[in-house]
Every structure is written in C-alpha cells, then in structure tokens.
Image (cartoon, grey):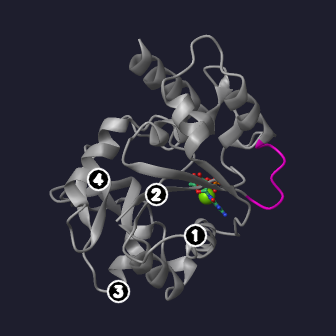
Amino acid sequence: SRFIALLPAAGSGSRMASSTPKQYLPLLGEPLMLHTLRALATVAQIEQVVVVLSPEDEWFDLVETALAAPGDHAHPGHAALAQKLRVLRCGGASRAETVRNGLRELASTLDAADWVLVHDAARPCLQAGDVIRLIDSLQSDPVGGLLAVPVADTLKRADAAERVATTVSREQLWRAQTPQMFRHGALLAALSSCADSNITDEASALEAQGLAPRLIMGSERNIKVTYPADLALATLYLQAATS
Ligand code: CTP
Ligand code: MG
C-alpha cells in the first residue's frame, strides 16, 4: 500500500489575529506552509503531498511562487515537493470537514488500504525523521496511530471557582500531535459517521469506532503555530534544524 500526506490548510487562524492567514505568514522568509509541505515531501515513502485549501483561498500563489523560484539556500526537499504537490480546494467549515472532503476527493485514486498521513499545515517544524519513525512503526499495524509527546507539566482539575479540585496524575497522559496515520478507507468511514463537534483529531474519530490508535513518540519541537508568540518559537526551531 502507498503513503499519502494530506494537509488541512483551510483554517482562518482566528487566534493568530493576523490579516494574512497564519499558514501564509513569513517564516524565515518563506510562507509558513511551505516549510510544512517540504518536510513531508522530503520523506521518500510519501508519494503525494496533498494540501486542502478553502475554496475562497487567494493566498496559495505565495507558496507556488516560492516553490518556482527557490532562493540560493534552496532546501533539499524543494524539488521533491514540486514533484509530489497536489492542491485541492474543497476545505470545509471545520478541520474534520476539510479532512473528510479531501479524503472523498482522493477516493478515486487511492485504495482503501493506502495509508494517509494527516498533518496540520500549521505545524512547520515537523522533521522528516519523526515522519519516518511513524511510518516504520505503523506500516504493519492493524489500526494506525499518531505522533504524541508525554505531558510534562503537573495537571490540575479546577472546580467552578477555579480552585484546585484535584491534581491529575500525568502518568499515561500524552499530547496528541500530527501526522496521524490511518488507512484511507477506515479514516473516511470513521469521519463520515461521527459529529464534527465531537472530534478534534483523526484519532478520536477512530476511537469512536472502538479502535485504539497507537501513540508514537514525537518531538517537543513539532508545535502547532496558534498564537503570535508561536512564530518566534517556530523560527528558532527551524533555524536550529538548518544550522
Ligand atoms: N483547518 C482546516 N479547515 C478548517 C479549520 C482548520 O483545514 N475549517 C486547518 C488549519 O488550517 C490548520 C489545522 O487545521 O492547518 C489546525 O487548525 P488550527 O490550528 O485550529 O487553525 P485555525 O482553525 O486556522 O486557527 P484558529 O482555530 O485560531 O481559528
Ligand atoms: Mg481552529
């Protein structure tokens, strides 16, 4: 079976509060999303990198321009991305709807058993090594799974007055990241049979079907750019990777 990356990129970035949607903000001089797409294209096993935009998106030219005219520090994944990139404009009102629409559009070209790695466009610091570990760990798994990291902070459950009711043990607690890797048929079926409001990632849709996705150790640097301060952190992580 094949491996395809699917990137939901149809969000409006309301928490970033920027006039340019966050996936297009400049990061080390290039659109944020270009870093994300390139990280996946660098992985040899991944055949196609499919990005799902909003039908109203007027910004993707920024990515295509940067891809067509790489600077003199051109990233090694650049050529691979030009080969593997496919753009869909069927994004929806929620992340789950965007992913479901993308999977439906891919149904004619994929087998049910092909693996889809769903990755947030807004996680530009993903490293190829983490993707390769995910693929190697899961390619003979019956369910699939996701990158995640163990919770490091002490966790408190609050009462209604925001006083500590209990300290929650962080043993066995993980923070879910992306990519999340599932078979096309199973993922589309799961996303078609649950309410979007009940799920915040692909794994939860599979969990609602009674399946148990595997947790694969990820990296702290695979942050989701959500707030303005995250841009500075993403810049540092990307610089550390290229130096
Ligand atoms: N996403 C999407 N379609 C939506 C909503 C989100 O494809 N209707 C994508 C975003 O573009 C992003 C990823 O899902 O790559 C993770 O979502 P999030 O970080 O929440 O991005 P936004 O929804 O754009 O940001 P916010 O929630 O602050 O508005
Ligand atoms: Mg959102």
Crowding at dot 4, Cα within 10 Å, few <14 / some 14-19 / many 20+, comes out as many
Q: Label 4 near label 2: C-beta < 8 Å?
A: no
Amino acid on which disc 2 is placed: Ile
Q: Label 3 near label 1: C-beta < 8 Å?
A: no
Crowding at dot 3, Cα within 10 Å, few <14 / some 14-19 / many 20+, comes out as some
Crowding at dot 1, Cα within 10 Å, few <14 / some 14-19 / many 20+, comes out as some
Amino acid on which disc 4 is placed: Ile
- Residues under labels 1 and 2: Cα distance? 10 Å
Q: Earlier in the sequence, mark 2 or mark 4?
A: 2
- Describe residue 120's horizontal placement relative to residue 21 as left or right: left
Q: Earlier in the sequence, mark 3 or mark 4?
A: 4
Q: Earlier in the sequence, mark 1 or mark 2?
A: 2
Nearer the viewer's eye, disc 1 or disc 3? 1
- Residues under labels 1 and 3: Cα distance? 22 Å
The residue indicated by pointer 2 is 4
Crowding at dot 2, Cα within 10 Å, few <14 / some 14-19 / many 20+, comes out as many
Task: Name the disc covering residue 209, or none.
Answer: 3
Q: Earlier in the sequence, mark 2 or mark 3?
A: 2
Which residues lie in the magenta part?
54-60
Tell me the chief SS of the magenta region: loop
Q: Label 2 near label 1: C-beta < 8 Å?
A: yes
